[in-house]
């Protein structure tokens, strides 16, 4: 295995761990859903924007699913893995598409993040209603998922700009 692949795997593992910690460290319980709001999606977006592609998706999915498993939400882990993986892959693909049409980078971050967070809200509604058997009761989690998505979008955009100013984005992208 060459140096670049090892570096990419290490960065992916680091971001999976960061995603798990960010998801687990701040948990605000939601009323009536037995769930919680967290800041893990901020790191999911960073996985998309900094690592990208399948590696970013794996970091986001593995870290988020691991947080579910460690936090006692094992029934959510498979859905979380798929949802967070797709969030990161879609946000990355959109960001790359926006770069090709020369859209100002900050707009690309915001638009790709909005789509990713809407995917999260829809994904959990589908997973809870169909796969966990909650039916229309899954509607109860939509509001808190929107709050989480909006909060993490704002935090993610703020952090990516800070990382860009500190030249960390350029450094990470040299290795992935």
Image (cartoon, helix red, strand yellow):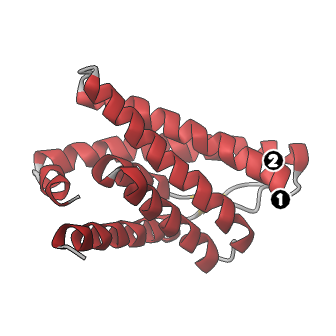
Q: Which of 161 and 31 is in front in this view?
A: 161
In the structure shown, which secondary structural element does the residue marked by tag 2 occupy? helix
* Figure check: 146 above or below 44: above
Q: Earlier in the sequence, mark 2 or mark 1?
A: 1
Q: x, y percentage for residue 143?
A: 68, 41
Is disc 2 in contact with disc 1, using a CB cutoff of under 8 Å? yes
- Of the 4 image quadrants, the one containing the C terminus is bottom left
Q: Which of 148 and 66 is in front in this view?
A: 66
Q: x, y percentage for residue 56?
A: 39, 56
In the structure shown, which secondary structural element does the residue marked by tag 1 occupy? loop
| Residue mark closest to the camera, 2 vs 1 | 1
**Which residue in the structure is indicated by mark 1?**
132
Q: In this view, does 173 lie to the left or right of 110?
A: left
Instruction: Estimate the spatial distance between the alpha carbons at disc 2 and disc 1, rounded to whole Å.
Output: 9 Å
* Figure check: 72 above or below 32: below
Q: Is residue 11 left or right of residue 140?
A: left
What's the residue at 27%, 29% (across, down)?
99
Residue 122 visible somewhere in the drawing: yes
- Of the 4 image quadrants, the one containing the N terminus is bottom left
Q: Which mark is residue 138?
A: 2
Query: Please, which residue is most extreme toward the front here?
Result: 1
User: Which quadrant would residue 175 be assigned to in this image?
Assistant: bottom left
């Amino acid at each position: 295995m060459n140096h670049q692949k090892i570096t990419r795997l290490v960065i992916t593992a680091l971001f999976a761990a960061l995603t798990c910690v960010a998801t687990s460290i701040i948990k605000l319980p939601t009323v009536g859903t037995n769930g919680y709001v967290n800041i893990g999606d901020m790191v999911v977006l960073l996985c998309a924007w900094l690592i990208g592609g399948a590696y970013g998706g794996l970091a986001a999915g593995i870290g988020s699913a691991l947080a579910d498993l460690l936090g006692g939400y094992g029934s959510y882990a498979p859905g979380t893995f798929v949802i967070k993986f797709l969030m990161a892959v879609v946000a990355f693909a959109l960001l790359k598409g926006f770069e090709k049409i020369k859209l100002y980078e900050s707009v690309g971050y915001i638009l790709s993040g909005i789509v990713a967070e809407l995917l999260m809200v829809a994904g959990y509604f589908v997973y809870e209603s169909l796969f966990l058997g909650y039916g229309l009761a899954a509607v109860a989690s939509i509001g808190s998922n929107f709050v989480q998505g909006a909060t993490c979008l704002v935090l993610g955009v703020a952090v990516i700009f800070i990382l860009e100013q500190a030249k960390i984005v350029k450094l990470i992208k040299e290795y992935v």
